[in-house]
Amino acid sequence: MPSSSVVCDGFARMGSMTAAGQGMPNLPMAEYPGNVAFASVEQLQTNVSSITVDQIIRGLTVQPEEAGVAAEPQPRDIVFKGTFEEVNRHFYDKEWSDGLPIVPPSIEKTEQFLRFTGRPAGEVVGVLLPDRREATVWSIAVNGVMAGCRPEYMPVLVAMVEAMADPKFGQEHLGHTPGGEVLITVNGPIIKDLGFNCEQGALRIGFEANTTIGRFWRLYLRNVAGFLPHKTDKGTFGGNFRVVLAENEDAVAKIGWQPMSVDQGFQAGDNLVTVAMCVETNQALQCGAPTAEGILKAISARMADNQLFVGMMLAGQRTRPQIIMTPCLAEVVARAGYSKQRVRQYFYDQARVPVSRLRPIDRERLESGIRTGMLPKQFSESNDLEREIPLVLSPDDFMITVSGDPARDHCCICMPNGMIGYPVSKKIELVANWRELSKER
């Protein structure tokens, strides 16, 4: 069927590569020069009529040339032999590396990882976009080796890719222009078993499990999903890979709360990995007020100051901020009788933004949501432009995690972008002899 897809020229290469991944390597593209947001109506008309229209007509009237599909190596093919330095240069030139040194993924090293999962090497965990490539247990092991992971991390890596491939997560959007990074949270005994850091510097590189497993995520998105900078990864600024966050479950138990795994529908004590897109990260610094209400007020004010992608929520997309409280803050709040649910309700009631601060398009979304009944009644309490509306659709949308320096009164606020990278949790399945295998190493 004749077609012509219209894109701004900055997205033309991404459009072509994404189309190829969807099985349409010869999809006609019509380019608009520059960014339409900065064009006047007159400029827009001129550019479209003088540049874009001819390309649209060509796409609709000229049969595109057939495009071949490049063959890829088989899983056990040897793709290169050489020294450590030569291997790293070859992988970098092939765009199989993130620019840091990688561990050469030999067959022997890859098979060591496979010992820590009971799943066949060729099992397909899912199919990832934009390249529409199968995510297999074998490729998980290969990229785990490259990232510098230890073989006993393999069950965590498999669970992460299961979450990545879950349609609810929406990994096909991860090349978006906000360029956020996924926040990966781990719960369960696996935290101590693998030596995850969950105290001071919880999100800082320097701890083997937190760092290498976090690096694996970004490598896998490059090498299997196919997100490459200047091509299919269009992050405006982008960011470094984010190390894995481990919840301090001892601190959670001490104050009488349940770990985040329970909030996600699992049992306390389950080994769990949760992945969620994090577009913005902010800190509420030194919010250790004498009272629980003072602490929660400070955190709420910091959330409201930033508006936290409220426009996506007004468009009907559920947003789920993840609030990381240090143990000393959580202890003061819990000691005052606040359950996690009561904390979420406080944030819903107090972390609000005046309608007057919304962009015009978001005000239109607000009015439409009220008119159609899509938004809760809290959004239509009056017509006053200075009235304040919640940042999320429901108190349950706030995710609360306890981690970080036990001696500091800081809070980290991690914000998503609607359904782009929606939180998904998967159990980490350990083989029966996982502990014995780990002790052998």
Image: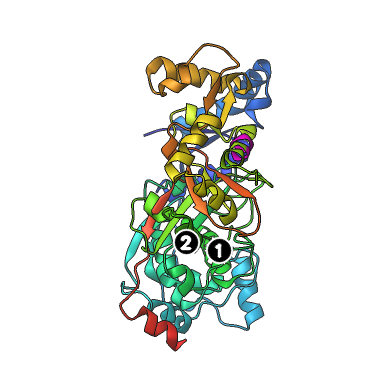
Q: Amino acid at mark 1?
A: Cys
Furthest-bottom residue in this view: 440
Q: In this picture, is 385 found above or below 351? A: above
Q: Earlier in the sequence, mark 2 or mark 1?
A: 1
Indicate which disc residue 405 carries: none
Q: Dot 2, crowdedness within 10 Å: few (<14), some or many (≥20)?
A: many
- SS for tag 1? loop
Q: Which label lies toward us, 2 or 1?
A: 2
Q: How far from the left and from the top, in percent, is residue 9?
A: 62, 37
Give the residue drawn at x 37%, y 63%.
269
Quarter of the image with the N terminus in it: top left
Give the residue drawn at x 65%, y 33%.
305
Q: How is the image coloured?
A: rainbow
Q: In this picture, is 323 found above or below 213? A: above
Q: How far from the left and from the top, in percent, is residue 376?
A: 41, 24
The residue that label 1 is drawn on is: 198
In the drawing, does residue 365 fall left or right of residue 1?
Answer: right
Give the residue drawn at x 45%, y 59%.
253
Q: Quadrant of residue 303?
A: top right
- Foreground of the two, 384 or 71: 384
Q: Amino acid at mark 2?
A: Glu
- Foreground of the two, 212 or 19: 212
Provide the residue span drawn in magenta. 298-303
Does the magenta-highlighted stretch encompass residue 13? no
Q: Quadrant of residue 361?
A: top right
Q: CA distance from mark 2 to mark 1?
A: 9 Å
The residue that label 2 is drawn on is: 249
- Foreground of the two, 418 or 87: 418
The answer to whether the residue labelled 2 contacts the one labelled 1, judged by CB atoms less than 8 Å apart, is yes
Q: Dot 1, crowdedness within 10 Å: few (<14), some or many (≥20)?
A: many
Q: How far from the left and from the top, in percent, is residue 227?
A: 53, 53
Residue 68 seen by the camera: no
